[in-house]
Amino acid sequence: MLRSLALVAALLLATPALAQPLPAGADPQNTLLVDTTQGRIVIKLRNDIAPQHAARLKQLAREGFYNGVPFHRVIAGFMAQTGDGQNGNGTGGSKYPDLKAEFSNVPFKRGTVGMARKGNSNDSANSQWFICFGDASSLNGQYTVIGEVLSGMDVVDKIKKGEPVQSPDKMIKVQVAADAK
C-alpha cells in the first residue's frame, strides 16, 4: 500500500513537468528539452540556418548521448559549455564525424546556443555546444549558431561556474520535444 501511495505521489509531482506546454514559437520537432540539476532549459534549434548541426543534436539526444553529461566549462558573463558525452571534460566528441561549419549572420547574444569546436578548425564541431550568458559578438561569423533558449535562462544563470567546474551541474536528460515522455 505504501509503495502504491509513493508511486501515485511521484506521478502527480512529475506530471506538471511533463505536461508543461512549449513556449510560443516552438516546433516540437526542433526543440530540445534539457533537464538539468538546476531545472529545465528549452532550446529552439535553428535548422533553418544550421541543418546539419540541428540534425546532429537531435540524433545525439535521441540516442541518450547527452544524459548525465556535465557543464564542464562555465565562464561567468560569457558561456556555459557542455556536450562531451565521451569524456565529460571537454576533450571528447561523439562516434560521428565532425561537421562542416554552418556560419550565419545571426549574432551571439544572451541565450544564443552555439557549437563548440576543436582549436582553430572551423569544420571540427561534433557534439559539444554552449549557451551564451550575454553578448558574445566576438564569436560572430566564427562559430555556428545552432539555436536559442526559449525558456530557462534563469536556470542557465544558476549553473556552477569554473574552468574546469568543480562538482559540475549536469544535463540529467535531453529530449527532442516531439519525443518527450
Image: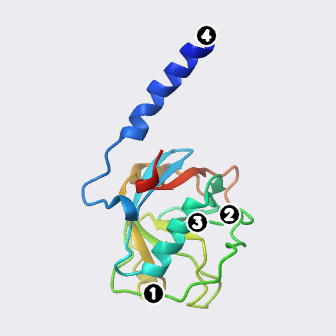
**Disc 2 designates what residue?**
85
Residue 166 in the image: x percent, y percent? 70, 53
**Residue of label 4:** 2
Q: Quadrant of residue 63?
A: bottom right
Label 4 with label 2: CB-CB less than 8 Å: no
Is tag 4's residue or tag 2's residue first in the polypeptide sequence? Answer: 4
| Whole-number angstrom distance, CA of label 1 to CA of label 3 | 18 Å
Q: Are marks 3 and 2 in contact (CB under 8 Å)?
A: yes
Q: Earlier in the sequence, mark 3 or mark 4?
A: 4
- Amino acid on which the number 4 mark rests in the picture: Leu
Q: Earlier in the sequence, mark 1 or mark 2?
A: 2
Cα distance in 3D space between marks 1 and 2 = 22 Å
Q: Separation of disc 3 and disc 2 at Cα?
A: 9 Å
Taking the spot 59% from the left edge, 81% from the top edge, the residue there is 117
Check the picture and name the quadrant holding the N terminus: top right
The picture places residue 152, in percent across and down from the top left corner, at 40, 51
Q: Position of residue 58 (x, y in %)?
A: 50, 66
Q: Which residue is mark 1?
A: 102
State the CA–CA distance, disc 3 to disc 4: 38 Å
Along the line of sight, the residue nearer the viewer: 133 or 19: 19
Distance between the alpha carbons at the discs numbered 4 and 1: 54 Å
Q: Toward which corner of the image does residue 88 lie, by quadrant?
A: bottom right
| Residue at the image position 68 percent from the left and 69 percent from the top | 90
> Which labelled disc corresponds to residue 60?
3
